[in-house]
Amino acid sequence: MIVVIDYDTGNVRNVKNALDYLGVENTLSADPQTILSASGIILPGVGAFAKAMDALKERNLIDVIKQAAKNGIPILGICLGMQLLFDYSLEFGKTKGLSLIDGSVVQIPNDVGVKVPHMGWDKNEVVSDDPMGIPFANQFTYFVHSFYVKTAQANVIAKVDYGVEIPSIVRKNNVIGVQFHPEKSGRIGLAGLEKFKELILDADYSRD
Amino acid sequence: MLAKRIIPCLDVDHGRVKKGINFADLVDVGDPAEIASAYERQGADELVFLDITATEEKRKAIVDTIAQVAKKVFMPLTVGGGISSVADMKKLLKAGADKVSINSSAVSDPQLITEGAEKFGAQCIVLAIDAKWNAETNQYDVYVNGGRKNTGLDAIKWAKKGVSLGAGELLVTSMDKDGTKDGYDLNLYSQICSAVSVPVIASGGAGKLADFDEVFQKTNVDGALAASVFHYGELTISDVKNELKRNKVVVR
């Protein structure tokens, strides 16, 4: 069972719709026990970083997510949910994140001749042989964001070029993040969610 | 680099798509979810739903329509028409819309743009502007109420003001070009694009493949919206994209 963390930020419904469409068993929940017994976790998110961290904190979910990551449960952060996986963000002052992947979240510079927010379909360049990158090689996915992550190259699976290099897929062990919205990226996005489901199955085998 | 977006627009009246759609693979030509799926298969980058339901009490149908579409179609969805409060926006976004577009209500209550942007993020708030050239005053006038009332506002100034209030995108319809199939209003979009730094969607005038190419080659718009050429099957989205690719415009 995939648990989509429901913490009142952004549209979790669209992520659920995509999983339902794929026939992937899933539930929306903010219950610690349900989250810790999940086979996979999706952390969605739209909006402001600090507000989202507050919403997780109010629901006592920060330690729960960290524990789930430690237990080896595959976690997929989407958009702001990916940014939350990092150490801190500089959006409206410095805010601490979940520190599941080393790195920070900074503003996309708008002095490089691009419009900010980065909104629309952009092309992923896959830079590692991680299986999570396979569905996205040279494919367009849908982005909406004004901040992006800075992290070690070793954590980057794919990137897009938007005046600066924006990591579009990151991974550290069982913790994965996608900057785009797979649930809004047509069949490519759905293929990515399928790939995450496969990783969950593999993780189940390796833990047995 | 972002791909240029091709955006079909569907007029929805009380949960049904108006203007018969001539796709061979459609069973129900009025079902929004089926039409949206057909457009997705053709390669649409985004869909705009314009609620043209005349009566207030029947307007809630659009919320169910969007909820149905969002279960089957996985691309950005924008909804416009009759949205006049933050509560209206919330219902639609919760149902699965990614953006809401406001037009007349933004002119009568500009604060609505700011309230929406603060609550949901600027990327959710699209300011729709219906513009018509006024030869006497040498400006583009802003029209409201479905193009029936001239506000006398200067469209370029209104665009700038809308963005400063929090609009994350502009959907600009040229009333001079709408329905002519004579090409997009290049002068209007050049002016709007140099005035603002948010994405601009061109609407009105698409008739042939070259029209799409021209608006992307000659102006800095991010997307091109069209209704009838796609509805009546005169052009398919794949035709448009192939033509754009051939001319080195980045498309998905």
Image: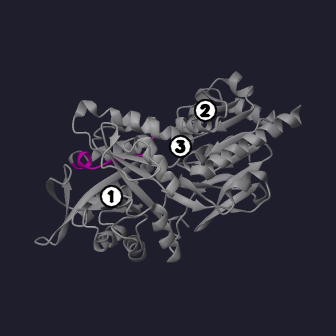
* Mark 3, residue position: A46
Q: Which residue appears at 58% of the width and 40% of the height? A: A18
**In the shown orientation, is residue A146 left or right of residue B223?**
right
Q: Looking at the image, which residue sits at the far left? A: B136
Same chain? Circles 3 and 1? no
Q: Amino acid at mark 3?
A: Val
Depth check, front residue: A55 or B244: B244
Residue A15: x %, y % from top left: 58, 39
Same chain? Circles 2 and 1? no
* Mark 1, residue position: B228
**The N terminus of chain B, quarter of image:** bottom right
**In the shown orientation, is residue A168 left or right of residue B250?**
right
Q: Amino acid at mark 1?
A: Ser
First to last magenta residue range: B96-107
* Mark 2, residue position: A56
**In the shown orientation, is residue B143 left or right of residue A180?**
left
- Secondary structure at numbered mark 1: helix
- Work out whether A181 lies above or below A51: below
**In the shown orientation, is residue A168 left or right of residue B174?**
right
**Which one is in front in this view, the residue at disc 3 or the one at disc 1?**
1
Depth check, front residue: B222 or B169: B222
Q: Which residue appears at 40% of the width and 37% of the height? A: B65
- Secondary structure at numbered mark 2: helix
- Work out whether A67 lies above or below A147: above
Disc 1: host chain: B
**Is residue A25 covered in magenta?**
no
